[in-house]
Image (tube, rainbow, N blue to C red):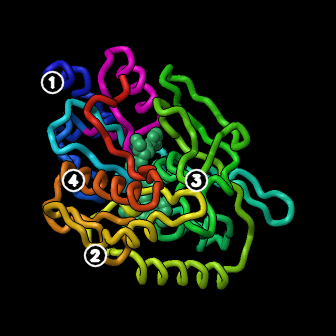
């Protein structure tokens, strides 16, 4: 820790939060303290940090808005790198024919800010993402979306910072994107991506977004900390419907509970621990497997102390 303080301290290009609990960084409000949260103020500082981590073999992870992760309860000697102090720009690259607009969005931009930009500029193409919390970087990694579409639908390319410190552009056609996963290399940082939008009608956009938000409020348990859907929908089935049919709605381990409103959500009713959430997830997986012969896949990223990048 002392060595880490010496290595990182004194540089004006990084915001450092020592011993910050992951509970403060995640929408689940769960997780013990990490060695340090580092927020570079520029892309250059991020690149320098990543090569330093690699050179010194310092365990680290990348984190966006923390809205799709379950962090461990115990303290964790890891550096958490967040891009919310850099890579925060939305830049129009070009206006194509037929009202097409290419827009580059930094990984540190909040998804809600991107949607506000689209509304202001009357640009259609990513309305399916309305109401999804977190950052653009996280949305790209997760291929975030709803039943109306996902971010991969409008993505043209992703800019990555490789473990080697090199910048690399990966085009959409090269990505094995599928439902809730983009298939990016796990050890690369997402710097941002280019999306294709088109000029649309402000009124239509407002109506669509308003309707999507009303549906969310009606079907999702917004009142408690959570990470949204816990499991991916299996092919031709709804994870929520399977969990509900297995009689698991409302089942609780400590303060971790299968939501009574939406069975694919686990909510933190107060002081839930990661251990309780995990126990509940395993119980749901086992019950659904026994009842329907379907193995649910986890959508939420369960962070483990042994799996950080070096
Ligand atoms: C109330 C609620 C509603 C939700 N609704 C939806 C929904 O409708 N649809 C949906 O798809 N999801 C939904 N989610 C889940 C979540 O919001 C999305 O998956 C979101 O895109 C995650 O973004 P994030 O920035 O929070 O990522 P994080 O949770 O911070 O990270 C997710 C993963 O991406 C990695 N990562 C993040 N940023 C980077 C980066 N810049 N470079 C490299 N790796 C990175 C992390 O290491 C982690 O493995 C919901 C969550 C909540 C809490």
Q: Is residue 82 above or below residue 46?
A: below
Q: Nearer the viewer, mark 4 or mark 3?
A: 3
Identify the residue under disc 1.
1
Determine contact: label 1, label 4, CB under 8 Å.
Answer: no
Residue at the (33%, 74%) spot, across then down: 222
Query: Dot 1 lies on which element?
Result: loop
Identify the residue under disc 3.
179
Spatial CA span between label 2 and label 3: 27 Å
Spatial CA span between label 3 and label 1: 39 Å
Residue at the (33%, 72%) spot, across then down: 247
Spatial CA span between label 4 and label 3: 26 Å
What segment carries the magenta color?
A: 37-65
Residue at the (61%, 30%) spot, across then down: 168
Q: Is residue 289 above or below residue 60?
A: below
Q: Position of residue 124 (x, y in %)?
A: 68, 69
Q: Is mark 1 within 8 Å of ligand 1?
A: no
In this view, the residue farthest toward the top is 55
Q: Is residue 180 above or below residue 81?
A: below
Q: Nearer the viewer, mark 2 or mark 1?
A: 2
Identify the residue under disc 4.
30
Identify the residue under disc 2.
223
Query: Closer to the N terminus: mark 2 or mark 3?
Result: 3
Query: Closer to the N terminus: mark 4 or mark 3?
Result: 4
Query: Closer to the N terminus: mark 2 or mark 1?
Result: 1
Q: Position of residue 127 (x, y in %)?
A: 60, 70
In the rendered image, the quadrant that contains the N terminus is top left
Q: Residues within 10 Å of mark 3 (few under 14, many from 20)?
A: some
Rendered image: mark on residue 27 = none
Query: Closer to the N terminus: mark 1 or mark 4?
Result: 1
Q: Is mark 3 within 8 Å of ligand 1?
A: no
Spatial CA span between label 1 and label 4: 23 Å
Can you tell which quarter of the image residue 280 is in? bottom left
């Amino acid at each position: 820790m002392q060595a880490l303080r010496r290595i990182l301290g004194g540089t004006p290009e990084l915001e450092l939060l020592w011993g910050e609990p992951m509970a403060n960084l995640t929408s689940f409000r769960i997780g013990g303290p990490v060695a340090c949260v580092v927020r570079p103020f520029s892309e250059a500082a991020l690149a320098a940090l990543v090569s330093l981590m690699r050179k010194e073999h310092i365990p680290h992870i990348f984190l966006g808005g923390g809205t799709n992760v379950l962090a461990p309860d115990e303290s964790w000697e890891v550096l958490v790198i967040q891009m919310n102090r850099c890579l925060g720009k939305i830049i129009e690259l070009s206006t194509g024919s037929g009202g097409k607009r290419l827009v580059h969005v930094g990984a540190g931009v909040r998804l809600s800010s991107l949607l506000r930009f689209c509304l202001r500029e009357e640009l259609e193409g990513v309305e399916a993402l309305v109401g999804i919390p977190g950052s653009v970087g996280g949305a790209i990694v997760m291929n975030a979306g709803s039943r109306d579409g996902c971010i991969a639908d409008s993505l043209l390319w992703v800019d990555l910072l490789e473990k080697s410190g090199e910048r690399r552009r990966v085009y959409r056609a090269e990505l094995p994107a599928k439902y809730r996963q983009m298939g990016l290399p796990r050890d690369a940082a997402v710097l941002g991506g280019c999306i294709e939008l088109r000029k649309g009608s402000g009124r239509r956009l407002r109506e669509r977004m308003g309707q999507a938000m009303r549906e969310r409020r009606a079907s999702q348990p917004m009142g408690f900390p959570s990470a949204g859907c816990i499991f991916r929908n299996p092919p031709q089935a709804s994870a929520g419907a399977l969990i509900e049919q297995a009689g698991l709605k409302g089942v609780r381990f400590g303060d971790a509970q299968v939501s009574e409103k939406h069975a694919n959500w686990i909510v933190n009713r107060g002081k839930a621990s990661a251990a309780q959430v995990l126990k509940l997830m395993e119980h749901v997986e086992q019950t659904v497997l026994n009842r329907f012969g379907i193995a649910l896949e986890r959508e939420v990223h369960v962070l483990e102390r042994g799996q950080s990048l070096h």
